[in-house]
Each structure stands twice: as C-alpha cells, then as structure tokens.
Image: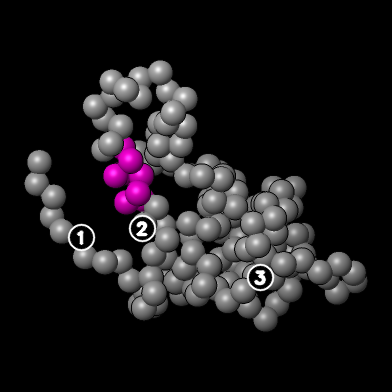
Amino acid sequence: MVILSKLADYGVIVATHLAVNPDRQMTAAVLAQETSLPRATVAKVLKALAHGDIVAGARGATGGYRLAREAASITVSQVVAAIDGTMGVTQCTVHGPDCTRVQICATRPHWKRINDAVETALSAVTLGDMANPFGPLTQRSALPKQASVTP
C-alpha cells in the first residue's frame, strides 16, 4: 500500500482549503479551525508549503496565507514534494545507489515503473480539481489512458 506521510496528507488538506477560498487570506489559526487540524501542525505545514512556493504569506494585522499561484497550476505531487521531498514507494526508488542489493535486485526496475506511475497520477490532479471534487478533471489533469500491460 502506498501511504503518504500524515504531514503530506495535511498539506493537501490545507492547500485544498486555500484553493476552495482563493479570495481569502487565512492565518494558521483560521486554517486550523476550519480544517479541524491542530494549529501547530498547520503552522508546520504552511512553513513547508511556503518554502516549496505553494503558498505565499503576508505579515501584519491583515496577514495570512493564500496560494502562491492559481490552484489549477499546482499539482498534488508538488504539494506532497513540498512536505515530504522526493516521493518513493520503496526505499530503492529514492535511495537507489545506496542500496547494497542494487546490482542483484530483480524488482528494482519494476519499483521504478510503479513509482513513476504514482508520480504521474499525483501530477495529473491539481488543487483546482481537489477544490471541486464533483466536477470534471481539468484538461491539464486528465489522466492519459494506459495501455494494458501483460506479464
């Protein structure tokens, strides 16, 4: 089972909430309350998202956070990468050369293909899509039809 980290999951929730409300600038406290996530966690997520250029923050009495660009131009993959860094479904897809089994492992090429497929899927869905869960996928995010693979 492919599992995102809890922080990456929260990052997608927070970024999607900002996408649903593009005209609002929200503080960490407001985001925490409206998403039912712990305030400290939301602050940590926002810091990572800001570092990844997903959100932009403004200081001051009317400060807060909003998406750094249009929701339709930010993919779920970019949000996950801002929180977790390089995605890998197995250790060898991220730390390949460091593995002592790299020269003899028959599964490594297949894990790379699987990892690439997951990355492609996450890159095909934007925050605009996430903000409109019952609407059609945006033209950019429509998943290409996959050719059937026979063993």
Task: Work out whether residue 86 or residue 76 is closer to the camera in this orientation and state it.
Answer: 86
Q: Going 47% across and 68% down the picture, which residue do you hit?
A: 126
Residue 70 visible in this rendered orientation of the protein = yes
Categorize mark 1 by other alpha carbons within 10 Å: few (<14), some (14-19), many (20+): few
Residue 59 image point, x, y percent: 86, 67
Specify the principal SS of the magenta part: helix
Q: CA distance from mark 3 to mark 2?
A: 22 Å
Q: Which residues are magenta?
A: 111-118
Residue 40 image point, x, y percent: 75, 47
Callout 3 touching callout 2 (CB < 8 Å):
no
Q: Going 26% across and 38% down the picture, which residue do you hit?
A: 110
Say which residue label 3 marks.
68
Relative horizontal placement of residue 72, taking residue 104 as reference (left or right): right
Q: Is residue 127 above or below residue 46?
A: below
Say which residue label 2 marks.
121
Residue 20 visible in this rendered orientation of the protein = no
The quarter of the rendered structure image containing the N terminus is top left
Q: CA distance from mark 1 to mark 2?
A: 11 Å
Q: Going 35% across and 20% down the picture, which residue do you hit?
A: 101
Which amino acid lies under the numbered mark 3 shown in the image of this protein?
Ala
Q: Going 69% across and 55% down the picture, which residue do you hit?
A: 51
Q: Please tell me the numbered disc located at residue 146.
A: 1
Q: Secondary structure at mark 3?
A: loop
Q: Is residue 109 above or below residue 102?
A: below
Q: CA distance from mark 1 to mark 3?
A: 32 Å
Mark 3 vs 2, N-terminal side:
3
Q: Is residue 38 above or below residue 124?
A: above
Residue 77 image point, x, y percent: 48, 56
Q: Secondary structure at mark 1?
A: loop
